[in-house]
Image: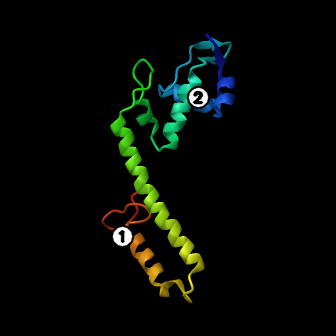
Amino acid sequence: MTSLDIAEVARQAGVPASTLRYYEEKGLIASIGRRGMRRVFDAGVLERLALIALGRAAGFSLDDIARMFSPQGQPNIDRQVLAAKADELDRTIRKLTAMRDGLRHAAVCPAPRHMECPTFQRILRAAASGAIGGRKHAHGLPMD
C-alpha cells in the first residue's frame, strides 16, 4: 500500500494542506495515520480529491459532495441529483449568455445613449424582472 504524507498529497492535488485538514475534519477524506507530526494518506485519496474538485467545479457544496460517498468511502452518486444540477447549470448558462450578449450589444450599440436603445431597454427590463442576474425577493432586493 502506497502512502503519501500531507505535503505530497497537497502538492499532487494542488490544494493547500489546510484544505486537506478541513476536508478531513468534514469527513470527506481520512488519513491512515501519522509519520512524525504529519498526516499520512493512502494514495487513493488523490482520486477522492479529484472527485471533490469535480463536484466543487460543478457547483456542489461540500455537504452535497459528502452525501455522494457511501459510509465505506466509495462514490454513491444519485443520478437524479446530477440531472438536477445539470438543469440548474443550463439555466445559469442561459442567463449568462443573455448577459454576455447584452453587454456585447451595449459595447457596440449605435444609439447615441444606451437609454435610447430598444435592445438595451429590453435588457434592463429582463434584469429588473430577475430573468438575468440573480433571483430577487418580492421587494426587489437580491437574494444572493
Using the image as rendered, state which of residue 144 and residue 80 is in the foreground. 80
User: Residue 20 placed where, x, y %?
Assistant: 58, 28
Q: Name the residue under label 2.
A: 20
Q: Is mark 1 on a helix, strand or loop?
A: helix
Please identify the residue farthest to the top as the structure is shown: 1
Q: Mark 1 points at which residue?
A: 129
User: Residue 95 placed where, x, y %?
Assistant: 44, 62
Residue 59 against residue 6 in the figure, above or below = below
Image-quadrant location for residue 108: bottom right
Residue type at mark 2 is Leu
Q: What element carries label 2?
A: helix
User: Residue 18 placed where, x, y %?
Assistant: 61, 31
Using the image as rendered, state which of residue 51 and residue 23 is in the foreground. 51
Residue 67 against residue 34 in the figure, above or below = below
**Pair 2/1: label in front:** 1
Of labels 2 and 1, earlier in sequence is 2
Q: Is residue 10 left or right of residue 139?
A: right
User: Residue 64 placed where, x, y %?
Assistant: 41, 36
Q: Is residue 15 left or right of residue 82?
A: right
Q: How crowded is mark 2: few (under 14 residues within 10 Å), some or many (20 or more)?
A: many
Residue 78 against residue 6 in the figure, above or below = below
Please identify the residue farthest to the bottom as the structure is shown: 112
Which image quarter holds the N terminus?
top right
Q: Residues within 10 Å of mark 1 (few under 14, many from 20)?
A: some
Image-quadrant location for residue 77: top left
Q: Label 2 to label 1, Cα distance in Å?
A: 42 Å
Residue type at mark 1 is Ser
Disc number placed over residue 4 in the picture, else none: none
Q: Is residue 141 left or right of residue 55?
A: left
Q: How many labels does the image show?
A: 2
Which image quarter holds the C terminus?
bottom left
Q: Does the image show residue 99?
A: yes
